[in-house]
Image (tube, rainbow, N blue to C red):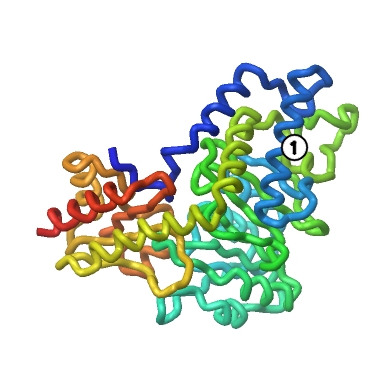
Amino acid sequence: MIYLDNAATTLVKPDCVAEAVTDALGNMGNTSRGANKAALSSSVKVLEARMLLAGLFNAGDESRVAFTSNSTEALNMAIKGCLKAGDHVITTVWEHNSVLRPLYEMEDRGVNISFVGMSDEGLINPEDIRKEIRPNTAAVITTHASNLTGDLVDINKIGKIAKDNNLLYIVDASQTAGVIDIDVEKSGIDILCFTGHKSLLGPQGTGGIYVRDGVDIKHFKTGGSGTMTFSHSHPDNMPDKLEAGTLNGHGICGLCAAVKFINETGISNIREKEDELMKMFYNGVKDIPGVKIYGNFNQKQRCPIVSLNIGDEDSGTVSDILSYKYDIATRSGGHCAPLAHIAFGTKEQGMVRFSFNFFNTEEEVKAAINAIADIAK
């Protein structure tokens, strides 16, 4: 199978990831639950992963990084833990349902939402966010990159706008963590939400949230923490505050190995290869009669995603043909990004999304180009 659905989850991981998970399954105890050798080795490995992620995002104090099951859980923590009735929040039409659905829940509880649309260039204009600021605006929430087109949001400019207006800036880095450089200090990010199973090359069921020191975020859940056993209240210190219950230590070991691989390989080298594969595919299909490509390919940086349609054909039909006739895995339909599809006018047709990974090859890309050319005929 030619796997080009990496924006959903990376299928091919570095060998070290599976090795780390397998080793953990046989040797790891429960983090922060005891002083025996197995428990302590688990605590050390989780701390190592926390430190590596803090370094990857220039987060400074590793205790500001808490582990979650994915970015959806992290975004729920951020949105439900920081907003209250009467608050106003600004977001964009590019957002994933992991942002939209928690926001709609908060809207039912009295939070007001403003949605910024795409500019004439098909991008998110930071100045449009500035125009939506009100006296009761509490936060700005944006994705770092559209999971539909791969286009980037200028988080540096938006972060400055948020800081200048004393607003919380929450960023969904689901598509970018591991392939695009993220510096929470430089970008003025107060809360960063990320998942481990995409470009971070880790196992499913892993992810995390960075919370800037001084940001008030409520508990998402309470329970066992391994500390303060006789207190009626859950610990209020990071990361325990957001890590009630047993962590996915086995998965975190895999994520730790994945981040090591990224650091050793070089995030710029990973990005360069994925970018080359993406551009190769884009240039190979953009002039095929009947093919329509979505997104702005004039950006200096973007995620390795190309979404397209062939004529008026349903995207699901095209994706099925690619799968069953050519053994090429893609993603069709709405991609959990309903407002983006409405903005592009593809609510009914959807799009066929091709997303590339460091372990894909030029031969696979050529096969995908030929398949699109055949289907278009």
Q: Which residue is mark 1?
A: 47
Question: Relative to the observer, which residue lies in front, 243 or 368?
Answer: 368
Could you tell me which residue is drawn at 72 percent across and 47 percent down?
A: 65
Q: Indicate the secondary structure of the residue bearing disc 1.
A: helix
Residue 289 place in picture, x, y as percent: 15, 67
Relative to 56, is 124 above or below?
below
Q: Residue at x 44, y 43 (%)?
A: 9
Question: Which one is in front, 177 or 75?
Answer: 177
Q: Quadrant of residue 235?
A: top right
Q: Is residue 102 visible?
A: yes
Residue at x 76% of width, y 22% of height? 39
Between 1 and 90, the one nearer to me in the picture: 1
- In the depicted structure, whether residue 31 falls above or below residue 308: above
**Residue 86 visible in the picture:** no
Q: How many marks?
A: 1
In the image, residue 39 above or below residue 136: above
Q: Position of residue 268 (x, y in %)?
A: 53, 58
Q: Quadrant of residue 220?
A: top right
- The x, y position of residue 130, in whole percent, is 62, 80
Rendered residue at 56%/52% (across/down) = 266
